[in-house]
Amino acid sequence: MTRSSHAAVRAQQRCIPPLIEQWLDQFGEEKYDGNGGILLYFSRASIRAMERAFGRAPVRKMTEYLDAYKVESSHDGRVLTIGHRTKRLKCR
């Protein structure tokens, strides 16, 4: 997984630790954004899967980061940006 320089700067500015990026890769739900990107985010189901894998206490400690998202390129898998969701995702 390679990151663009923009994604590296945004992860640092938004204080998103590398562990959260790993969890997004392992447990995050994927949604295509329609512009050549794949949005990875935590849903209720993915949070429950993390609780089964790691236990409830470690996941609870990281709740401030569970609104994180990551956008990857659908062409080469490169991470384009990382951030915190401020609005609800509309799933169709």
Image (cartoon, rainbow, N blue to C red):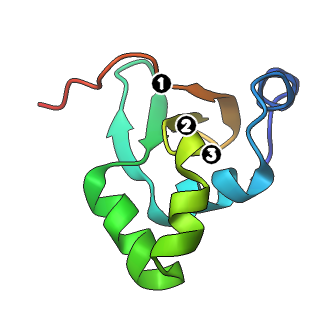
Mark 3 vs mark 1: give the one in front: 1
Q: What amino acid type should be assigned to the residue bearing mark 1? A: Arg
Marks 2 & 1, CB-CB < 8 Å contact: yes
Residue drawn at (42%, 74%), measured in percent from left and top? 51
On the image, numbered disc 3 is attached to which residue?
Answer: 77
Residue 53 in the image: above or below residue 46: below
Comparing 28 with 32, the one in front is 28
Marks 3 & 2, CB-CB < 8 Å contact: no
Residue drawn at (80%, 38%), measured in percent from left and top? 3
Comparing 54 with 27, the one in front is 54
Secondary structure of residue under mark 1: loop
Residue 17 in the image: above or below residue 82: below
Pinpoint residue 39: horizontal percent, then vertical percent: 45, 35
Gap in angstroms between the C-alphas marked 3 and 2: 18 Å
On the image, numbered disc 1 is attached to which residue?
Answer: 85
Q: What amino acid type should be assigned to the residue bearing mark 2? A: Ala
Q: Is residue 43 left or right of residue 73?
A: left
| First in sequence: mark 3 vs mark 2 | 2
Q: What amino acid type should be assigned to the residue bearing mark 3? A: Gly
Q: Is residue 74 left or right of residue 92?
A: right
| First in sequence: mark 3 vs mark 1 | 3
Secondary structure of residue under mark 3: loop
Secondary structure of residue under mark 2: strand
**Which circle marks residue 68 in the picture?**
2
Q: Quadrant of residue 41?
A: top left
Residue drawn at (64%, 43%), measured in percent from left and top? 76
Q: Is residue 19 left or right of residue 62?
A: right
